[in-house]
């Protein structure tokens, strides 16, 4: 550095504590550690809220390793390789490995069953509570907002203990259902307009086009009605759905159109 670029210090500048020599001072705009911190030199002590050992174990468990599978090399997670080795050793007659593997499977199945049954029981309690509350409202003629999800939108399948929802499950989903209802109304208007055009006696070519478009609209409406349509259609039981698929027709009808419009749609 030339003398012209050296910092100008007072004439009585003294070297001492907090006053390093000019030649060794950090220069403005120049890093005192241009190399930066060496890689890997991070604090090895985890913070109080961290569980770094669990993270390390999971990272190692799901680290891919190469294995030989039917003469080919492929990569699978380390935990998968260990479970596979345990199962294979059990199959080869290692009783301890067989017992460990069987116990692990039984525990997982029991845990899964408990999760399903707990969810099913919670849904049953929710339906029972809200059905009683809605009945109380009807009896007292109270007009209050419906709960979300509505108990009628919760379909309980006792055959396998599963819970299905045929309606919005949260207030946030109302926007989606409102958009679906708007789309249904647009398609209904298009259907009515094309039905009017068809009744006016168009040419054979135009008639074929209209019939194809009407058929497409009917199929789209059937799908949208089941998802976003009136509650009596959305909440139809699985048995009705199966019968509809078997007969190839809609047993619930098009309640928003009226009977005459529904009959015209099934022509």
Image (cartoon, grey):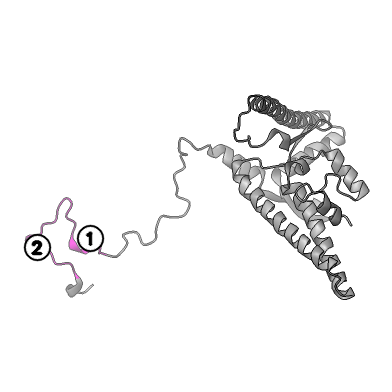
* Residue closest to the eye, 122 or 203: 203
- Please name the residue shown 86% across and 39% down the image: 239
Instruction: Name the residue at 86% across, 36% down.
Output: 91
Kindly identify which numbered label has been placed on residue 250: none
Let me know if residue 78 is in the magenta part: no
Percent position (x, y) of residue 136? Answer: 65, 24
Secondary-structure class at tag 2: loop
Q: Is residue 85 above or below residue 212?
A: above
| Closer to the camera in the image, 164 or 175 | 175
Q: Earlier in the sequence, mark 1 or mark 2?
A: 2
The circle on residue 10 is 2
Per the picture, the main secondary structure of the magenta-coloured stretch is: loop
Q: Is residue 45 left or right of residue 6?
A: right
Quarter of the figure that contains the C terminus: bottom right
Q: Which corner quadrant of the image does residue 213 belong to?
A: bottom right
Circle 1 SS class: loop
Is residue 67 visible in the rendered structure shown here?
no
Question: Can you identify the residue that label 1 sits on?
Answer: 25
Q: Is residue 24 magenta?
A: yes
How far across and how far down the image is residue 63, in percent?
A: 66, 48
Picture quadrant of residue 23 = bottom left
The stretch of residues the image draws in magenta is 6-28
Q: How many marks?
A: 2
Residue 232 in picture, x, y percent from top left:
76, 41
């Amino acid at each position: 550095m030339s003398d012209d670029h050296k910092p100008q210090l007072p004439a009585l500048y003294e070297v001492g504590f907090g006053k390093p020599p000019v030649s060794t001072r950090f220069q403005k705009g120049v890093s005192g550690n241009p190399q930066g911190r060496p890689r890997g030199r991070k604090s090895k002590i985890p913070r109080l809220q961290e569980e770094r050992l669990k993270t390390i174990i999971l990272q190692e468990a799901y680290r891919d390793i190469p294995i030989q599978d039917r003469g080919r090399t492929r990569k699978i997670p380390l935990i998968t390789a260990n479970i596979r080795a345990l199962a294979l050793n059990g199959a080869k007659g290692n009783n301890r490995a067989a017992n460990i593997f069987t116990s692990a499977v039984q525990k997982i199945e029991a845990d899964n069953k408990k999760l399903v049954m707990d969810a099913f029981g919670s849904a049953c309690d929710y339906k029972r509570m809200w059905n009683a509350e809605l009945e109380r409202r009807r009896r007292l003629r109270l007009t209050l907002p419906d709960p979300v999800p509505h108990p009628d939108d919760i379909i309980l399948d006792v055959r396998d203990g599963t819970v299905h929802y045929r309606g919005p499950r949260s207030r946030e989903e109302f926007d989606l259902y409102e958009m679906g209802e708007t789309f249904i109304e647009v398609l209904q208007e298009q259907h009515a307009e094309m039905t009017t055009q068809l009744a006016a006696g168009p040419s054979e070519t135009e008639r074929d086009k209209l019939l194809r478009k009407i058929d497409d609209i009917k199929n789209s409406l059937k799908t949208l009605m089941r998802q976003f349509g009136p509650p009596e259609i959305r909440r139809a039981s699985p048995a009705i759905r199966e019968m509809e698929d078997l007969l190839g027709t809609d047993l619930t009808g098009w309640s928003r159109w009226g009977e005459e419009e529904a009959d015209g749609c099934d022509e």
